[in-house]
Image (spheres, helix red, strand yellow):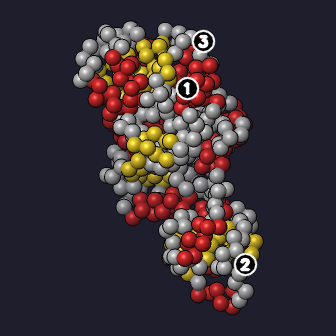
Amino acid sequence: MMQIETVLDILKNDHNYRHIKHFDDYYFHFQGVTFEQLSYDSRQVDEQTLFFAKGASFKAEFLEQAVSKGLSWYISEMDYGVGIPVILVNDIKQAMSLIAMTFYDNPQRKLQLLAFTGTKGKTTAAYFAYHILRQEHKPAMLSTMSTTLDGKTFVKSALTTPESLDLFRMMAEAVSNGMTHLIMEVSSQAYLVKRVYGLSFDVGVFLNISPDHIGSIEHPTFEDYFYHKCLLMTHSRAVVINSDMDHFRVVKEQVDQLPHDYYGQTAENAITKSLPFSFDVKGKLAGHYAIQLIGQFNQENALAAGLACLRLGVSLSAIQKGIRETKVPGRMEVLTQSNGANVFVDYAHNGDSLTRLLDVVSQHQTGHLTLILGAPGNKGESRRADFGRVINAYPEVSIILTADDPNFEDPQVICQEIASYINRPVQLIIDRKKAIQTAMEQTQTSGDAVIIAGKGADAYQIVNGKRVDYAGDLAIAKSFLKTT
């Protein structure tokens, strides 16, 4: 429960309060107004809800629907004139985050918070941290792949970083479940649209940076993308940073006065020996580590997670055990066909992650390689040219272009655009299931491989703004093992 006086104090202290409209006598009568729930969904309100009218596409009819259900107060950047009091603010997203913190009794103070950012590797690093922390603590996790608030039940996540009202509600649920830590992926979008406004992290980890998420509905430029990535560092009490990443000097200048650990080829913390299923480390985590995920980039993610968990007080033995136990759905999962050919399923969805994936597979497979790839619609448009650049560097790989979350765009047009950047003929098979079947039927020897990139474990396709059921790359590949 929250009193209106508390709401107004929060807004005023944040210099975010303008005034109240349509409540002429509030100076004398609003003292008894209290709120039992917060909502930004007009379908989930009652007479004791404080409603937030957010989003560029928000319409007055949504509020009218809420008023018909008994809504009596809302917060907004504008007056929609629906006949109930409105608390006007300058920034609705800032208001949501700070009010949610207090409404849910500041759950962020009752958890140790570990956050990962980076263009790639966030989910894998989060899973490493989860398996490490669970050896000695009770971690909750919010990742692109899945969410767990009790360490037992895992559900598919809707967003990489939840909207602030959902985020603090989830934190409070984790606290009530007895969780001690929370691992989060914090996207650049989370800072762009202020989902984590006012939140500080115990440890923030910056894995890497490369051009991505640049487009009409995301970041307008790389500089804007990089700036919002860096905000995690300035809102963390201690940081772990990849010294091999692009623009490391810029980030280093920002964090040199903070407690920090750097890792990388020339850093104090470095991988000294890398084998397919093990690696050796020097520095604070010096020792030998077994790992299930192939590829040195996965070993680097494990190192970053281990350093972060060490700062949270976890023992070296727990770090070793946690890394050894980590598997990630849709990340470098491998199936073997009856003819010995391997099928690799991975979430690689931008130029850099695709390069790493192709490097790893080409090191292990000596025969013919076929890559199945698409690009999402209405986001990250720069990836399409990046995919062409990467594919051109691997002339021995056959290419099948297919649908991958086309959203409001025509997947045929997306594939044709990708193909325009490729300097050799490719196949276009828009039906993703048919593309997988075709590639698997073309394998002949144990040295051959099919590489299915982009969707990982996602069991849906985004079409016209909605999630459409899709069995998932791994499940589809498994179904064809019996027929190839």
Other residues around mark 3 within 10 Å, as few (<14) / some (14–19) / many (≥20)? few
Measured in 3D between alpha carbons, the distance from the residue under mark 1 to the one under mark 3, in whole angstroms, is 14 Å
Labels 2 and 3: the sequence-earlier one: 2
Please name which of the two marks, 2 or 1, marks the residue nearer to the observer: 1
The image position of residue 358, as x and y in percent, is 48, 19
The x and y percentages for residue 356 are 50, 22
Examine the rendering and report whether any part of residue 110 can be seen: no
Marks 2 and 1, how far apart in space? 51 Å
Residue highlighted by disc 2 = 21
Question: Above or below — where is 412 with respect to 188?
Answer: above
Task: Read off the residue under disc 1.
Answer: 415
Is residue 227 or residue 206 the one in the foreground?
Answer: 227
Residue 423 tag number? 3
For residue 88, side relative to residue 461 (left or right): right
Please identify, in this view, whether the residue under mark 2 or under mark 3 is nearer the observer.
3
Asked if the residue under mark 3 is in contact with the one under mark 1, i.e. CB atoms within 8 Å, the reply is: no
Q: What element carries label 1?
A: helix
- Residue 239 vertical placement versus 346 (above, below): below
- Label 3 sits on a secondary structure element that is loop
Residue for point 38% across, 36% down? 472
Residue beneath the point at 55% across and 76% down: 68
Q: Which of marks 1 and 3 is in front?
A: 1
Give, as a three-letter code, the residue at label 3.
Asn
Amino acid type indicated by mark 2: Lys
User: Which quadrant holds the C terminus?
Assistant: top left
Q: Is residue 126 left or right of residue 206?
A: left
Q: Are circles 2 and 1 on residues that touch, CB within 8 Å?
A: no
